[in-house]
Amino acid sequence: MRVSSIAVLLMLGLAACEGSNVAMAPPGQDIAGKQFAPPPPGMGAVYFFNPSTASPVLNVTANGQEIGRLGTQTWMRTELAAGPYTLRCRGGGSANAMNIEIAPGNIRYVDVQMLPGQYVCSIRETDPGSGQAGVMSGSRAAQY
């Protein structure tokens, strides 16, 4: 009986580790995104990043369209047409949202995370310095 209890605990531990993993983008895309290039004409860019070292996988959407999934210390960049957007995070059985206006040529930075002990993911815009630091300290997650 003792052996089976240990096996169950090991399997649960492995499952918990798997829950924080997301598919990663190729290294070239990570390097390119960290150049913070301006978006194409008429578009704006949004960097989503999760600086946390302990967080469940968080799904990110813009106006209901799936952008991708963030794990710990990961980031994504999406280019969006100018206009209003509702950005949403979902994870750990919770959801949260924020509204943002995207202007042509703008680059915005959005911190998305769920710290240990929190029951709701947080999504908030941050300043370019903090946003770029969060991106530089992470790795690019693959997007849908």
Image (cartoon, rainbow, N blue to C red):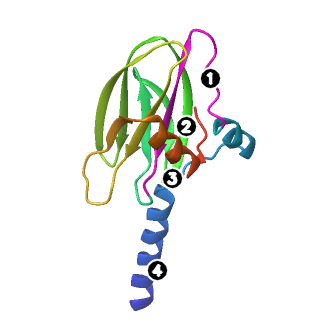
Density class for disc 3 (Cα within 10 Å; few <14, some 14-19, many ≥20) is many
Q: Residue 38 shows which numbered tag?
A: 1
Measured Cα–Cα span from mark 3 to mark 4: 30 Å
Contact (Cβ within 8 Å) of mark 2 with mark 4: no
N-term-proximal mark, 2 vs 4: 4
Image coordinates for residue 77, horizontal then vertical, percent? 56, 32
Residue labelled with disc 2:
76
Is-magenta flag for residue 129?
no
Question: Is label 3 in a helix, a strand or a loop?
Answer: loop
Q: Amino acid at mark 2?
A: Met
Q: What residue is at 43 percent from the left and 39 percent from the top?
A: 59
Residue labelled with disc 4:
7
Measured Cα–Cα span from mark 2 to mark 3: 11 Å
Q: Nearer the viewer, mark 1 or mark 4?
A: 1
Q: Quadrant of residue 144?
A: top right
Q: How many marks?
A: 4
Tell me: residue 50, above or below residue 143: below
N-term-proximal mark, 3 vs 4: 4
Density class for disc 1 (Cα within 10 Å; few <14, some 14-19, many ≥20) is some
Furthest toward the front, the residue is 129
Image coordinates for residue 67, horizontal then vertical, percent? 50, 30
Image coordinates for residue 69, horizontal then vertical, percent? 49, 41
Q: Amino acid at mark 1?
A: Pro
Residue labelled with disc 3:
73
